Image: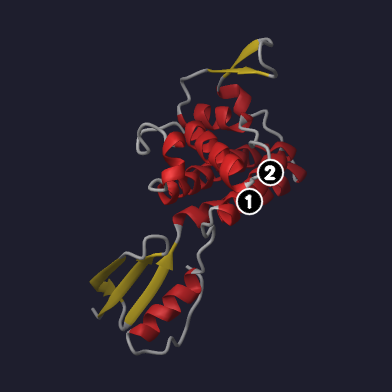
Amino acid sequence: MALGTQVIIDARTRQVRASLDAPGSGTSIFAVDLIGDTWQDFSYFTEKARAAERAKEFEKRNRFVRAAIASMFSHLDGLVSKVVSALWNETAFFPYRPKNANFCALKSKIVAIHDFLRNHRGLALPMPDMNLKLLRDVLNHPSVSKPFSEAPGGEVILLEGPDVYGVAIEDLDASGLELDRWLNAICLTVPYERFPDTKRLAEDFARALGSEPNSTQRF
């Protein structure tokens, strides 16, 4: 069986991994970005859920809603962690740094970034609504309950597994739009590249090796 070379580039770290015994022949070069892809996953699963709801295929609809929630917060978590790392060594960020960037709640990282950019770089957007994150936590840990209140000091209710099934497509749309705006704003302000161009990165890598790419596509 013919064996080829496969090169995989992490679009964010620029680390390269190569395998000399990949199926096929010749050399294949891929640039991948899991953080960026999870946002595309969120959009994809939201549209799938919308279509399934219209078709009254509710089991499929609920499956796609769960996948959309997980994908949305995978993107948020990954990007926020990268932004914290990008700011970590800036002197002005020291008072805002979480105690441990590797073992820190997502909300703490978001607050740190938001407060720093608001106070030092003029970020004007409000903090994003994180209510759906409570249901993401329930989705990831189905045996837990998460306390929720509409307002500070208001009545507290416990969100549990069945509440995940109550998420409306409109909730996904609204949360996605709000997070998209906030993430675009912080990436512009830091600055930090939200969506690396994986296709161009793979092509540039091939040219750096002295070859002209003959077939490229997003992977």
Q: Position of residue 131 (x, y in %)?
A: 63, 29
Tell me which residue sits at (43%, 51%) in the image. 86
Cα–Cα span, label 2 and label 1: 9 Å
Residue 69: tell me if it is visible.
no
Tell me which residue sits at (71%, 35%) in the image. 168
Residue 207, quarter of the rendered image: bottom left
Q: Position of residue 121 (x, y in %)?
A: 59, 48
Give 30 or 193, whichever is nearer the viewer: 193
Tell me which residue sits at (49%, 73%) in the image. 199
Check disc 1 and report its element: helix, strand or loop.
Answer: helix
Give 134 or 78, whichever is nearer the viewer: 78
The image shows residue 207, relative to residue 163, as above or below, that is below
Task: Report the quarter where the N terminus lies.
Answer: bottom left
Count of marks, rendered view:
2
Residue 94: tell me if it is visible.
yes
The image shows residue 71, relative to residue 105, as above or below, that is below
Q: Position of residue 147 (x, y in %)?
A: 57, 16
The image shows residue 32, relative to residue 79, as above or below, that is below
Q: Earlier in the sequence, mark 2 or mark 1?
A: 2
Q: Residues within 10 Å of mark 2 (few under 14, many from 20)?
A: few
> What residue does disc 2 label?
124
Q: Residues within 10 Å of mark 1 (few under 14, many from 20)?
A: some
Residues at circles 2 and 1 in contact by the CB criterion of under 8 Å: yes
> What residue does disc 1 label?
185
Tell me which residue sits at (37%, 60%) in the image. 13
Give 34 or 94, whichever is nearer the viewer: 94
Of marks 2 and 1, the one in the foreground? 2
What sort of colour scheme is used for the picture?
A: secondary structure
